[in-house]
Amino acid sequence: MSLSAAHSAAFRREVPQERRVWSIRDTAGFPAPRDATGNRAMPFWSKPTRAGRVVEAVAAYQGFEVVEIPVRDWLDSWLPGLRRDGLLVGVNWAGALATGYDVAPSRVAGWFAELD
């Protein structure tokens, strides 16, 4: 299993347990960088420590704050908004380059369809 696959599996396992996700923001807002093909993704993490490690390790995210989002708000508002805006969901990005899977919001919503 690749590292990105392991982080994705952890995301799917941990979000229902935590009942929230985390992102990062600065005074300009939430990041949504482009990948090599021009697609944009907004990153989310299943634990605040995961997000914090990226803020500490990635120069582009130095000074960002970790933001908690209740899972219900994320599923009901954020994911539909990302879909409308043509953005992907960055899933538990990690490492010095903050890399990982970028997934369509509708697919991510399907992962958590059973959450009440």
Image (cartoon, grey):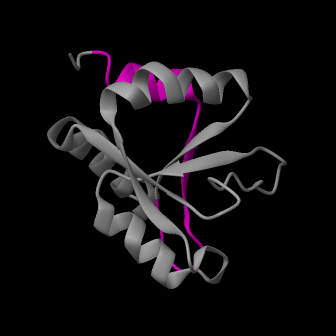
Q: Is residue 77 above or below residue 91?
A: above
User: Could you say where residue 36 lies in the image, as x and y percent from the top left?
Assistant: 81, 57
Q: Is residue 78 above or below residue 93?
A: above
Residue at the left extreme? 17
Q: Quadrant of residue 80?
A: top right
Question: Which quadrant of the figure contains the N terminus?
Answer: bottom left
Q: Nearer the viewer, residue 98 or 5?
A: 98
Give the extent of the magenta segment. Answer: 93-113
User: Could you say where residue 16 lies in the image, as x and y percent from the top left?
Assistant: 21, 35
Q: Nearer the viewer, residue 16 or 23?
A: 23
Label count reads: 0
Residue at the front extreme? 27
In magenta stretch: residue 96: yes
Q: Quadrant of residue 34?
A: bottom right
Q: Nearer the viewer, residue 54 or 69?
A: 69
Q: Residue at x 35, y 66 (%)?
A: 50
Q: Nearer the viewer, residue 67 or 112?
A: 67
Q: Is residue 15 left or right of residue 51?
A: left
Q: Quadrant of residue 99?
A: bottom right
In magenta stretch: residue 103: yes
Q: Residue at x 71, y 59 (%)?
A: 28
Q: Is residue 28 above or below residue 52?
A: above
User: Could you say where residue 81 lies in the image, as x and y percent from the top left?
Assistant: 62, 25
Q: Residue at x 77, y 44 (%)?
A: 39
Q: Is residue 9 left or right of residue 83?
A: left
Question: Which quadrant of the figure contains the C terminus?
Answer: top left
Residue at the right extreme? 38
Q: Residue at x 55, y 28 (%)?
A: 105
